[in-house]
Image (cartoon, rainbow, N blue to C red):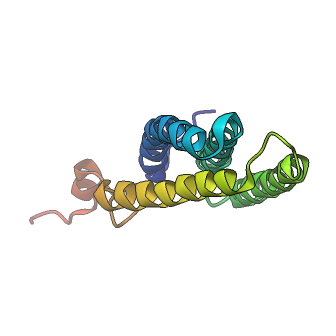
Amino acid sequence: MTATRSSSSAILRNTLLWSAVITGVLAVVGAVVGYLVGGGTGLVSALIGVLLAALFLGMTAAIILIASRFHGPDKFQIYFGIVIGGWLIKLIVFVVVLLVLRGQPWIDGLVFFFAVLASIISSLVIDLVVVARTRVPYVGDVALPTSADADGDRPSGS
């Protein structure tokens, strides 16, 4: 089985690439700011917040990339099943992780919150820039007729 790629794959790959770069920058900045604000607890909280947000935001693009292998008129149930199932699992895991981290003595809640918030805002900016700059055809993923097909349909004498 050969998997055809959708035009959104380039957008999602660029989003994952830039998200990884920005996550590294946010981890360094968050660690420094977290340490200055809350000492060792702030440093750990900032790193966990940035990495947790990056993991769950990156999972969204990864889920859609995996599901895009099953796109097509006869496979849309599989595509949507993977997307919705992946997001549901991601949501459940996210809530469980937050419940486990809540009240831990080695987590500074305010630093953690702002680290997650900075990661989410940067992810939204990355998504906006990547989508705005990526060239994707308006028509989408359709097969257009080739010149050989057009010659065969042309009436003789033209």
Residue ID at (90%, 47%): 100
| Number of on-image labels | 0
95 up-or-down from 45: above or below? below
Q: Using the image as rendered, state which of residue 76 and residue 16 is in the foreground.
A: 16
**Whole-percent x, y for residue 34 in the image:** 59, 43
78 up-or-down from 138: above or below? above
Residue at the limit of the structure toward the left, as seen here: 158
In this rendering, does residue 40 appear at all? yes
Residue ID at (56%, 37%): 31
Is 134 on the left or on the right of 94, as rendered? left
Is 18 on the left or on the right of 87, as rendered? left
In this rendering, does residue 71 appear at all? no
For the N terminus, the quadrant is top right
Is 135 on the left or on the right of 49, as rendered? left
Is 74 on the left or on the right of 61, as rendered? right
For the C terminus, the quadrant is bottom left
**Whole-percent x, y for residue 76 in the image:** 69, 60
Residue ID at (49%, 48%): 12
Q: Using the image as rendered, state which of residue 52 and residue 131 is in the foreground.
A: 52
**Whole-percent x, y for residue 114 in the image:** 60, 57
**Whole-percent x, y for residue 19 in the image:** 48, 43
Q: Using the image as rendered, state which of residue 68 and residue 124 is in the foreground.
A: 124
